[in-house]
Image (spheres, rainbow, N blue to C red):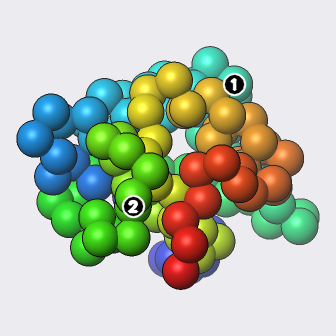
Amino acid sequence: MKSASAVTRLFVCTAQKDEVGKDVAKALKTELKKQGLKTLLTGGTTRKVRVQTCNCLDLCKHCKKGPGAAVAIYPDNVFYGDVKPKDASDIVREHLGDGRVIKRLLLDG
């Protein structure tokens, strides 16, 4: 059985009234395929990337940036707020591909 640590998970909140979270999750999945990053090689370890939707990440009170979705990335322990579908390419390329946190989307703890 594979270890849970061999998977990077992007949890996308879908509890918004306008359902932007569903569009964000779809855009993330599309970008992962487009950029060929459904599987990552990190530190010599192959990691699968999964995008999952969830009802609530309890981050709304921290997300004062706007009406986008909250996205939690595990095991990175990174939380993004006000994520819109157009941000998916940056999250996939910069965060997953290059290992850089996207400061403009980062939620303050």
Q: Is residue 23 above or below residue 8?
A: above
Disc 1 marks a residue whose amino acid type is Gln
Image coords of residue 78 (percent x, y): 59, 68
For the residues bearing labels 1 and 2, Cβ distance under 8 angstroms: no
Image coords of residue 70 (percent x, y): 38, 55
Q: Residues within 10 Å of mark 1 (few under 14, many from 20)?
A: few
* Residue in view at x 39 percent, y 61 percent: 63
Inter-mark Cα distance, 1 to 2:
28 Å
Name the quadrant containing residue 56: bottom left
Q: Is residue 16 left or right of residue 108?
A: left
Q: Is residue 34 left or right of residue 60?
A: right
Which dot, 1 or 2, sits closer to the camera? 2
**Which residue occupies the foreground of this view, 109 or 8?**
109
Q: Is residue 8 visible?
A: no
Q: Secondary structure at mark 1?
A: loop
* Residue in view at x 64 percent, y 71 percent: 76
* Residue in view at x 44 percent, y 50 percent: 65
Q: Which residue sits furthest right? A: 44
* Residue in view at x 58 percent, y 50 percent: 105
Q: Which mark is residue 35?
A: 1
Q: Which mark is residue 63?
A: 2
Disc 2 marks a residue whose amino acid type is Cys
Name the quadrant containing residue 85: top left
Image coords of residue 80 (percent x, y): 52, 57
